[in-house]
Amino acid sequence: MGRPVFPCSLAEFQARFASDAACRHYLAACRWPDGFCCPACGDAGSYLLATRDLLQCRACRRQTSVTAGTALDRTRLPLPLWFAAGYLVTTHPPGFSALQLQRQLGLLARYETAWTMLQKLRRVMVRPERDRLSGTVELDETYVGGVEEGRRGGRQRDSKKVILAGAVEVRGRGRGSGRIRLAVIPDLSAATFARFAEEAIMPGSAVLTDGWPSFRGLSGSYQHRPTVIGDPKNAAKQLPRVHRAFANLKTWLLGTHHGVGAKHLPHYVDEFVFRFNRRRTPMAAFQSLLGLTSQHTPTTDQMLYAAEPTG
Ligand SMILES: [Zn+2]
């Protein structure tokens, strides 16, 4: 028994996850794809349903929670509500604001509830990705915020601007992109780019950049292939994937969130990367979001309410 197939429309999704029991069944099937196995005694496949949330081992009687370790741990909200929220956040390309989520779900009387759900789901998205890019990778940097001019030129940099480094895998012969990594960086030095590349790209990969001197340090760990671009207007032609990623990010920040301050920008950047890298695998995104793919400490309500609402 493998992992269940992911519904491909909202209607199909809601029909399938209409009850707590259906959601619980899915959670159990994801967590124990080969059938339930008791963590205490190792007894496989035999259990009783003790309560709405607990499986009880027939052999040793130990009880195991279906939601422990997931984003739904100890929730008081109905599971179908969580599932619908996870589906919307995963499949709606520009991402959701708390107000949009409240309206879409209809059942949430309080804005605060929608906000809390969204924050819990976002906790997963804002953890930086760990797998490094490989193959051939485009690498460049951009400014976010302030006015969009003055790329590296002698012009003064707006102090509100933030520098963002980006790397995108080259896929196929056309302009196809694989996975991406984006990170806020403090400056344009060789040491900074070396550190970004080390965290984002597997050693030995081919790295395509423009002719900026700070990229020269990459030749130690990578097959560095710089291209002198000359006029900055040609940069988007020479490195189309990373420039498209920058443009999409900026559109998303302005369109959905009406601009984001420097303080919160890293979280939004990580959410963008999470969504982009799973754009063709909504089931993987949904399961990551609910905490079904990796064990991590669940976010408690206290942790969330201690945080400051960001919209
Ligand atoms: Zn047992």
Image (cartoon, helix red, strand yellow):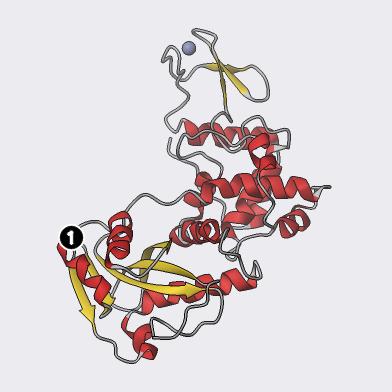
| Residue 89 placement: quadrant | bottom right
Camera-side residue: 84 or 234?
234
Residue 155: x percent and y percent? 44, 85
Q: Is residue 56 above or below residue 196?
A: above
Name the quadrant of the N terminus: top left
Q: In the drawing, does residue 291 fall left or right of residue 79?
A: left
Count how many numbered circles sit on residues in the image: 1
Q: Residue at x 60, y 47 (%)?
A: 121
**129 vs 221: above or below:** above
Judge from the rendering whether residue 202 lies leftward or rightward of residue 60; answer left or right: left
- Taking depth in this image into account, of 160 and 222 the one nearest to the observer is 160
Q: Is residue 32 left or right of residue 174?
A: right
Q: Is residue 114 visible?
A: yes
Say which residue label 1 marks: 221
Whether residue 17 sits left or right of residue 197 in the image: it is right
- Pick the quarter of the image with the C terminus: bottom right
Q: Most extreme residue toward the right, as rendered? A: 109
At a point 61% along the width and 66% down the height, the residue shown is 260
Q: Residue 188, how many percent across, how many down? A: 35, 70
Residue at x 64% of width, y 53% of height = 12
User: Does the image show residue 84?
Assistant: no
Which amino acid type is shown beneath numbered disc 1?
Ser
Percent across and percent down for residue 56 are 57, 15
